[in-house]
Amino acid sequence: MSSGGGTRREDAGRLRRTVEWALSQSKEQDELVRMLRRLAAISAPDSEDFRFAHRHLAELLVEREPWLAAISARHVIAQTPDDDGACTVLGHFRAAVSCYRRAAVRAPGNPWYAHNLGHLLDVTLDRPHEAVRLLERAHKLEPKNSEIATSYAHTLGRVGRPAEGRALLRRHIRGAGTAAERKLLEWLEKTEQEQAALAAREAPRKRRPRRHTS
């Protein structure tokens, strides 16, 4: 009788063969992405099937959903730093960052250069502390723009300021908001609660008097 782990590996192996066939047949991108996400979900995180799924997700999503492409690329590079496909995807983003840096220097009053550069640094290169200053500037230049506000709110959450991010996002959500906005708001609220719980646990330690030794 097969163990649960063995069954999971067998399922991943079968699905990978199906995905490889679908890739060879140039199936529709949405169908491929669904299959690859399923493969990543059922594969062991340290397996070649997991890396295979995220390598192809990075390549397929690089133009349509760059932030998700970057996450997949980082999954691969965390295990195989010299992976050509994943490195190419991250190289694409680094090249874009260089272009936006030059553009932002030439036109410091352009909010979209600051926004695009900040958003790339935050979600694709995992550098939120550098991104937050750029997104703050973009928001000051275009305070009513919801896209800029959403990007800024996300980065505030990542640098330990979730309450500010939540308040900012709430001011810019129209009606029930989009699915992405609701998901971001939920994450900010959860992060704020976790931060408050941590502060409550740390408070008694800070108040505890020091013992004096003679």
Image (cartoon, helix red, strand yellow):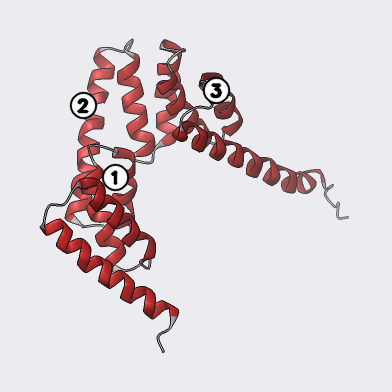
Secondary structure under badge 3? helix
Q: According to the image, label 2 marks what residue? A: 99
Q: Amino acid at mark 3?
A: Leu
| Nearest to N terminus: mark 2 or mark 1 | 1
| Residue 83 position by quadrant | bottom left
Crowding near the residue tagged with mark 1, few <14, some 14–19, many ≥20 C-alpha atoms within 10 Å: many
Q: Amino acid at mark 1?
A: Ala
Of marks 2 and 3, the one in the foreground: 3
Rendered image: mark on residue 168 = 3
Task: Give 147 or 114, whichever is nearer the viewer.
Answer: 147
Visible residue check, residue 172 = yes
Secondary structure under badge 2? helix
Q: Is residue 136 above or below residue 78?
A: above
Q: According to the image, label 1 marks what residue? A: 69
Contact (CB < 8 A) between labels 1 and 3? no
Of marks 2 and 1, the one in the foreground: 1
Question: As drawn, is 21 to the left or to the right of 15?
Answer: left
Q: Residue furthest right?
A: 214
